Image (cartoon, rainbow, N blue to C red):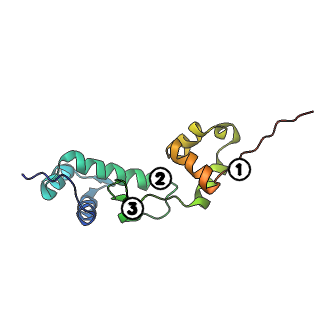
Amino acid sequence: MVQRKNLDQKQRESLLCFLLERIVNNQLGRGAIQAGAIQFSVTRGTVSRLWRKWNAARANPLNNQLDVRTLVSSGKYGNQYALKYNPEDLRESVTEIEVKRRRSIRPLALLLGISKTHLNHLILTQGLLVPRNCSKKG
């Protein structure tokens, strides 16, 4: 079996469609990952990683639309299909979290399901949250 180092975008989309066709009772059928690995000449880890990425994006409440191009992107630097969050949905998700749990970036990032570095970037560049000081001086 020839092992490919990387799959291009079309091959990744085809692999995801291959796996989606093999869903039985809302779960991936037995042997589907191995069959996909053989069909596309990649390792089982590559297929499994793509499937986990799909499941994580499907379960993520911040993504209202499932764009196959974004979900199966390689994630390498300079990829034109970077994962982007809708700022309005993100703000709404933040306001739904109680104030005690969003006092610092680390627990807030865990609850939102994004990295703390990315959350910090969104706060600084896009003004996602406005820092407030509620201490009374008197």
* Residue 88 image offset from top left, x and y in percent: 61, 61
* Residue 61 falls left or right of residue 92: left
Of circles 2 and 1, the one toward us is 1
**Mark number for residue 130?**
1
At mark 1, the secondary structure is loop
| 11 or 124, nearer to the observer | 124
Residue type, mark 3 in image? Thr
Of circles 1 and 3, the one toward us is 1
Question: Height in image: 88 above or below 99?
Answer: below
Label 3 sits on residue: 70
User: Which mark sits nearer the N-terminus, 1 or 3?
Assistant: 3
Label 2 sits on residue: 60
Residue type, mark 2 in image? Asn
Can you tell which quarter of the image residue 105 is in?
top right
* Residue 17 image offset from top left, x and y in percent: 27, 64
Question: Height in image: 67 above or below 3?
Answer: below
Quarter of the image that includes the C terminus: top right
At mark 2, the secondary structure is loop
User: Which mark sits nearer the N-terminus, 2 or 1?
Assistant: 2
Residue at the location (13% across, 55% down)? 41
